[in-house]
Every structure is written in structure tokens, then in C-alpha cells.
Image: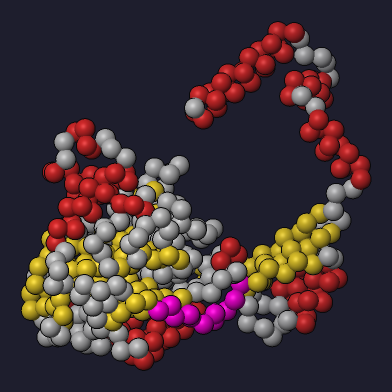
Amino acid sequence: MRILHTSDWHLGKNLEGCSRLEEQELFIEELIEIVDRENVDMIIISGDIYDTGNPPARAEKLFYFALKKISKGGKRPVLVIAGNHDHPERLSAAGPLAYEQGIILLGTPKSIARVGEYPYYKITDAGEGYVEIEKDKEKVVIITIPYPSEKRLNELISISMDEEEMQRSYSERMAVLFDNLSSKYRKDTINIAAGHFFISGGESTDSERPIQLGGSLAIDPSVLPRKAQYVALGHLHRPQKVKGTEVEARYSGSPLQYSKSEISYSKSLYIVDVCVGEKANIQEVYLKNYKPIEVWRCESIEEAIKKCEENSKRNVWVYLEIKTDRILLQSEIKEMKKTKEDIVEILPLFYESEKEEKELKSIKEKKVDELFKEFYIHQKQVQPSAEMMELFLSIINEEEEKDEAQDA
């Protein structure tokens, strides 16, 4: 079976208030062309279809257009799971109407696909967290884990766990879930998993909404189902293979650059060829960069204006950083934006004078009580009393003790 793995479309997402829908429409056109050209049998979309739980109408229209085209009227099954950006009920609302078109929409880890025989495929078995699909006499069992928040995870496994087990870490509870669901894998089926969560050690970017707090919702790579021939992951925007496990698990990444932190690598998706009992063969397919993000660093205002003139026709998003010893005039900002469209940010970087550098160095070398005394004199025009200084230092010590206790 040939499976295409993609995720993190974030339809409707903006860049500093600028719409990316035109670029997302170009991606969908390219995706349709890839699916047809590569003779894909099934598509897995591993979450974060939209950027918010209440996406704009144009974004929803684009999603349904994409599903219609890539499913080919039901001939090509498409499995979609929700990510942490998606509203699970809203995403799966069209589910009952979508099965005939080969589309399976799962909003939460408790979602259950509808067993039945459809024009071009069958769902032969399904339950909370798994689905078995038969197409062209091939059977594939997929463990399905839409974004498992702490609450959703507890709801899914609380029946089979006692109170002590429920107090285990998030990663340990995910291990229990995977162990339970792995029993659905068989020797005569292709065995896959699809999930939207953060694996410890993954390389993140600035554009993902964190789903782990201090590592509490991070999953150790060792808990991934060992019997899975491929794990199709969503959440991280950089395409990457999961390290620290023998399981073939990958994040497909987002199709577009969604922040400055994503400009140093190419965007892609994966095509996975997998047969019963054999190791998956994985091909990375690189996507076009429809409108790159660039950071222009200029040594002066004059250089910035000139660069805008020289690159006025280029179709790029621009973050403009300008070294200067004064505030930029509104007339200069207007000239830059008029000359070069799609400047999303102008950031002045002020030169530090020799005097300022000395003052900054002096401040860094002073103790906190000295700084407080200078500040108090500046504000009150009198020396702080001994009682005031004692109170201030006691507060500082209490805060330091709290920090040390938290670190321990």
C-alpha cells in the first residue's frame, strides 16, 4: 500500500496579520498533483488542519475542496485526525456524510469510525483509538490518536486503570494506551499509527502552539508502538525523523514557512510504501516555496530603502532589521512599504553610544542592594532607612529560596 503522510496545514493562518490563504491554495493544488502522479492509495493527515477552532469560511471551503480532490470520489481513503489547533467536534461534524467519499474524520482519541462497506473500501473494524480499513484486498490497521490532552487521555484509559496508575506521568499513560491498542495489530495486516503530540527530543519552531508544559505533556520516544511499521505524526513544523526509537516515526512538518525560525530548511511530505510484515520504504517529497520569508539586515536606513527598491518585484515576505542611531521617520517607513510590498515588520536596532555601554557595564557590575539604594534616592530624593533596606533584602532572599526549591 502506498500512503501519503502530511500534516499541520494551519489553513487560515496569518503572518503578522497577513493572510496566507493564497499560498495555501497553491499548496493544495500541488498536493492534488502529487497524489495523482504518485498513484497514492491512502492519505493520512495528522492534525492541525486549521489554525484556530473557528476558521474562516474560505479556509473551510479550501479543506473540503482538497478532500474531494485527493479522495477521488471515495476511491482513495483519507484519514484525518484533529490537532491541538482544531476544534474536534467542528472538524468531525461532516463525518457521517464523508464516509461515502472515502473520508474518515476523527476529532478525539475516543472517536470511533463507522464500520461499513463503502463503494471503494471497507471499514471492517473500529473502536476508540483504532480503525481497520480494507482496500483492494489489502488490510491496514491504524492506531489513531488525535490530540490527546490530559483530560481526553484520562477519559480514554480511566476505565482500565486504577487510581495509582492514573497518577503516572503523561508519557507512562500514553505507553499504556499504545500497549492496549497494539493488540489490534495482526500479522496479516499493514500496521500503522497516526497521532498528534510532542515527542521528547523533537526540533520545534516558533510557530507551534506549545502542548507540553515544562515537559509534562512530552512523550518519550520509547513508548511508541513497537509493532507499528510507520508512525505518521503531526505537531512539529520541521520535517524530521523521531530519534531514540527503532520505530519508523516521522513528523511530516507544515507545508509552508509559518515563522522566521522555519526559513533554513525545505518543506516536504512523505510517501510511504509498506507491505504486510515488511519494513516501510519512505520517500521525502519536497514542496515548492510559494512565497519565502526573508530577513533583511541593513546597516543603515539608506541601505534599507535601497534594498527595498532593488527587490521591489520579488514575491517574498520581509522582516526588515535596520541599524540606526535615531527613530525612523514615518515618511521613511511609508517609502519602504510603498516600494516593497509585504514587509511584515520593520525593526530598528539602535546603536549603543560609548557612554551607554559604560553605564550598562556599570549596572551589571553592581549588587542588587546598591541598585535599589540608587533607585530609591532617585525616586524619593532621600537615603533609604536601615529598616527599608532590611525589608528589601529579606524579600529578595525569600524569592531566591523559592527559586532554589523549585529547581530542586
Q: Position of residue 376 (x, y in %)?
A: 77, 21
| Residue at the far right in the pictured view | 354
Q: How is the image coloured?
A: secondary structure
Q: Can I make out residue 12 in this image? A: no
Name which residue lies at 43% across and 58% down: 243
Q: Can I make out residue 37 in this image? A: yes
Above/below status of 141 relative to 281 = above
Left or right? Give the position of 106 relative to 236: left
| Residue at the far bottom in the pictured view | 37
- Give whichever of 45, 62 is nearer the camera: 45
Name which residue lies at 89% across and 39% down: 358
Q: Position of residue 208 (x, y in %)?
A: 47, 58
Which residues fall within the magenta stretch? Answer: 283-293
Q: Quarter of the image holding residue 225? A: bottom left
Name which residue lies at 67% across and 17% down: 392
Left or right? Give the position of 27 relative to 384: left
Q: Quarter of the image holding residue 167? A: top left
Q: Position of residue 41 (x, y in %)?
A: 25, 83
Above/below status of 406 relative to 360 = above
The mark tally for this picture is 0
Look at the image and tell me in which quarter the N terminus lies: bottom left
Name which residue lies at 46% across and 68% down: 239
Above/below status of 361 relative to 338 = above
